[in-house]
Amino acid sequence: MKKLLVMAGMGLMFSASASAVAETLDGRAIFDKNCSVCHSINPPPKLAPPIIPLASRFHIQFKSKTDGVNHIAAYLKLPNKKNAIDQQAVARFGLMPAMKLPDKELRAVAGWVWDQYNPATGRGRGFGGQGRMNSN
């Protein structure tokens, strides 16, 4: 009986951890599927600003990841000129279309964008940024 209870408990633990893994969304995969048509990660730009300089701009504007991700996700859901992080990019590329993705996916890709900032690369170049960029 004791072995049966231990096995049942382990089964429940495995089931719960498998569910948590299934719910974790991959922001990079969402970017690759939905955003990479227009956005490159590094300069030069495609049809929209590259992600690395944008991530730098978000880190300048927002002091916490929570605030930055909230702003990015809200902007992806309903882009507007007033809330654009880089007015020069909007002038150059135009306003992006709204992303018709579930909120969880918007937050996952927003978190991934936020995490692309690397303080060692400086503020980024172009689109109003200053400093140097690594070209990967």
Image (spheres, grey):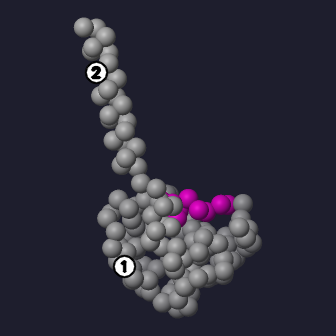
Q: Which mark is residue 9?
A: none
Contact between labelled residues 1 and 2, with CB atoms less than 8 Å apart: no
Query: Pointer 1: what residue?
Result: 98
Where are the magenta residues, as a range? 110-119
Given residues 42 and 86, the one toward you in this image is 42
Quadrant position of the N terminus in the picture:
top left
Does the stretch in magenta take in 115?
yes
Report the Cα–Cα distance between label 2 and label 1.
Answer: 46 Å
Label 2 crowd (10 A; few <14 / some 14-19 / many >=20): few
Residue 76 vertical position relative to residue 88 in the rendered view, above or below:
above
Q: Assign the magenta stretch its main secondary structure.
A: helix
- Helix, strand, or loop for circle 1? loop
Amino acid type at circle 2 is Ala
Which residue is found at the position 39% from the left and 65% from the top?
106
Q: Is residue 26 left or right of residue 15?
A: right
Question: Residue 127 appears at what percent x and percent y?
Answer: 61, 82
Q: Is residue 13 above or below residue 95?
A: above
Q: Amino acid at mark 1?
A: Ala
**Disc 2 target residue:** 8
Q: Residues within 10 Å of mark 1 (few under 14, many from 20)?
A: few
